[in-house]
Amino acid sequence: MIQNYYNSFLKLPLISQSSILTILIIAFTFFSILLLLGLRKSYKLKKENERLEKLSEEMSKKEEEYTDFTEGHMYQ
């Protein structure tokens, strides 16, 4: 009696295949969107970094040599 009840319990699926497939599709879609957003952000940060490096190089070319401005200061 107990053996028949146990065997019939094992035959009942707790979660159907279609609901597992639906959950997997939703999870795949969610993580794909996160991956695409991360790649987009990485591309934008790389582009901004290149722009700032170029700006830094331009500023260093225009930079004059340092001159000591404290020579004429009255508190020496």
Image (tube, rainbow, N blue to C red):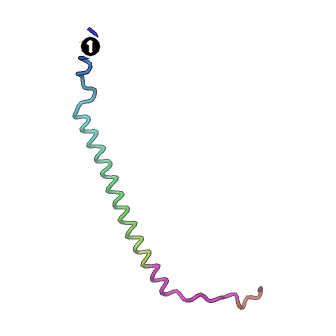
Residue, x 66% and y 88% (percent of image)?
69
Left or right, residue 19 beside residue 41: left
Number of marks in the rendered image: 1
Q: Quadrant of residue 13?
A: top left
Left or right, residue 73 beside residue 53: right
Q: Which residue is mark 1?
A: 5
Left or right, residue 66 beside residue 23: right
Residue, x 28% and y 10% (percent of image)?
2
* Residue 62 percent across, percent down from the top left: 49, 87
Name the quarter where the C terminus is drawn: bottom right
The relative height of residue 32 versus residue 71 in the rendered view (above or below) is above
Q: Residue furthest right?
A: 75
- Residue 56, magenta (yes or no): yes
Badge 1: few (under 14), some or many (20 or more) residues near its Cα, within 10 Å? Answer: few
Q: Nearer the viewer, residue 66 or 51?
A: 66
* Residue 1 percent across, percent down from the top left: 26, 8
Residue, x 36% and y 57% (percent of image)?
38
Q: Give the residues drawn in magenta, as a range.
A: 55-70
* Residue 44 percent across, percent down from the top left: 37, 66
Q: Quadrant of residue 67?
A: bottom right
> At numbered mark 1, what does the secondary structure look like: helix, strand or loop?
helix
Q: Residue furthest top?
A: 1
Q: Amino acid at mark 1?
A: Tyr
* Residue 58 percent across, percent down from the top left: 45, 83
